[in-house]
Amino acid sequence: MNTSNSPKGTALITGASAGIGAIYADRLAKRGYDLILTGRNADRLATLASHLSAETGRAVSTIVADLNDKSGLARIESVLREDQRITMLVNNAGVCSVASVLSADVDEMEAMIYLNITALTRLTYAVAPVFAAKGAGTIINISSAVAIAVEALNGVYSASKSYVLSFGHTLQRDLADKGVRVQTVLPAATATEFWDVAGYPKQKDAASTMTAADLVDAALAGLDQGELVTIPTLHDGEQWSRWEAERRALAPQFANARPAPRYVAAPVGKV
Ligand SMILES: NC(=O)C1=CN([C@@H]2O[C@H](COP(=O)(O)OP(=O)(O)OC[C@H]3O[C@@H](n4cnc5c(N)ncnc54)[C@H](OP(=O)(O)O)[C@@H]3O)[C@@H](O)[C@H]2O)C=CC1
Ligand SMILES: N[C@@H](C=O)C(=O)O
């Protein structure tokens, strides 16, 4: 394996064995990053690592770990805390469901919360102080368009992705003046195995579904443009800007000691 120390540093990508994560690996290696690829499927990770290393000359290593397992997650957290070469974290691993509250298995929902929220949070908490101390670093968190279009899929999945979007806003607030970039990416339907895992494989072939290559190329273009939130499928970017400006304008209106007049009860007997 190549052991180069890239001037770009090393990107650690979760869920790099397939889909969007594997494309991030390809694109970041071609941009000059060394890589640490993580996932559960050792064979797939090894194949991708040797292919990318041969093609790009970058140092590519792998960590086989289940992020739903506390000790697997802890291993990656300690790498993020200790490996000073790491300059980028791509929090990409995630699973989805299309089941309703009446048919979904609550244990599967809990596992999804652990992977989509707890693991992403713990990995961010591991690396953020390191990046802040160095005054540099990039965290890319993969959310979803259903963070906003919340009724589209399973509610726990949508809520987990809304968490990622909210968390990203506050990370930006906490880390911007420390030189740390935080980008939240909201893919809409993308053609990966994700849909097989979610139990809705036909979405992969739908005309409205983007390729993972187009998704990642657009997301990295958004990163290059300094975007905090990137929605690759949204053609009218001003729609997002207006929504976000409205949200920020609403925020200061909440602090008030008095209830809004519409909630002031009519005096008893005068209803
Ligand atoms: N595809 C889509 O339409 C959309 C996807 N997204 C988001 O994009 C991200 C990537 O999804 P996508 O590439 O499509 O999905 P894939 O199913 O193609 O890939 C998921 C990746 O996550 C890894 N993974 C899954 N479970 C675990 C686990 N318990 N521990 C460690 N790694 C795990 C898988 O690796 P392994 O099996 O080796 O563990 C795999 O590399 C997810 O966060 C998803 O929510 C957002 C919007 C739309
Ligand atoms: N964002 C996708 C899933 O997460 C979708 O919009 O289908």
Image (cartoon, rainbow, N blue to C red):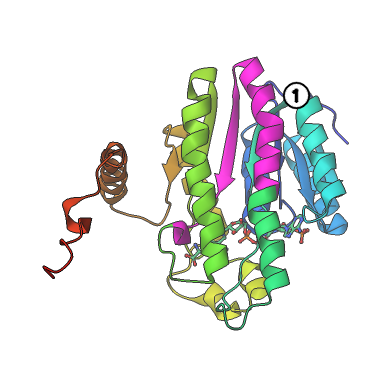
Question: x, y (%) of residue 146?
Answer: 46, 62
Residue at the image position 68 percent from the left and 49 percent from the top: 118
Q: Does the magenta stretch include residue 251?
A: no
Q: Is residue 33 visible?
A: no
Q: Is mark 1 on a helix, strand or loop?
A: loop
Q: In this view, does 91 lie to the left or right of 79?
A: left
The image position of residue 79, as x and y in percent, is 81, 33
Left or right: residue 34 compared with residue 42: left
Percent of width and height locating residue 236? 28, 52
Q: At 62% from the left edge and 43% from the top edge, which residue is drawn?
A: 27
Pointer 1 residue: 85
What is the quadrant of the N terminus in the image? top right
Residue furthest to the front: 269
**Magenta region, residue range:** 119-147
Q: In which quarter of the image is residue 268?
A: bottom left
Quarter of the image with the C terminus is bottom left
Nearer to me, 81 or 138: 81
Residue 120 is one of the magenta-drawn residues: yes
From the viewer's perspective, tell me whether residue 51 is left or right of residue 138: right
Q: Quadrant of residue 126?
A: top right
159 vs 230, left or right, is right
Q: Is residue 240 above or below residue 140?
A: below
Residue at 20% x, 60% y is 265
